[in-house]
Amino acid sequence: INAEYGGSMTEKTKPDKGVASLQLPLARVKRIIKTDQDIKLIGSDAVVLVAKATEFFIEHLVTQAYNKTKLEKRKVLQYKDLSVLIRETDFLEFLDDIVPEQLPEQNDNGPKDPQKEQNTIVQTTNNTNNTNNDPKI
């Protein structure tokens, strides 16, 4: 899958063994799957597979959006970066209705602070341990 998007398989993305490597809580993933009324039962191996696939999808989405951020010579991934990526990428078209182009205005007792309007999602750090320049989440 990585070769299809111009990347190569690294140690970080190689298939690994065991549930311990998952970041998403399996109970929550199972609960989300069960919200589909057509699904009565789901095996634990299917839950693990859905969780791992979701992690790969999120990693790909954030990495691609962060690459656009770096092209604009910025270090902070913002909501607009994800939104633009979804609008410009054909295979992410299914997210058009889910991720609005802009966040809706919030009426929280007064005008919004322009500094807080940044919608910061990921702040990268200059960490010497992070040699592959991946964003910190």
Image (cartoon, grey):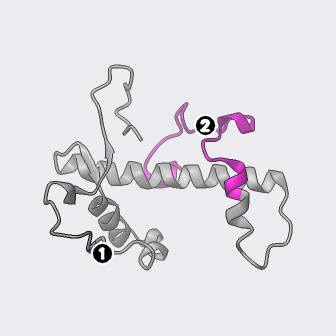
Main SS class of the magenta portion in the image: loop
Query: 102 or 93: nearer the eye?
Result: 102
**Which structural element holds mark 2?**
loop
Horizontal relation, residue 73 to residue 62: left or right: left
* Residue type indicated by callout 1: Pro
Which label is found at residue 86? none
Residues rendered magenta in the picture = 1-29
Disc 2 vs disc 1: which is toward the camera?
Answer: 1
- Residue at mark 1: 104
The image quadrant where one finds the C terminus is top left
Horizontal relation, residue 86 to residue 47: left or right: left
Q: Position of residue 26 (x, y in %)?
A: 71, 49
Q: Position of residue 59 (x, y in %)?
A: 48, 48
What residue do we see at 34% from left, 33% from top? 133
Instruction: Decide whether residue 24 is among the magenta residues.
Output: yes
Cα–Cα gap, marks 2 and 1: 38 Å
**Which structural element holds mark 1?**
loop
78 in relation to 93, above or below: above
- Residue at mark 2: 14
Q: Quadrant of residue 132?
A: top left
67 in relation to 84, above or below: above
3 in relation to 103, above or below: above
* Residue type indicated by callout 2: Lys
Callout 1 environment at 10 Å: few (<14), some (14 to 19), or many (20+)? few
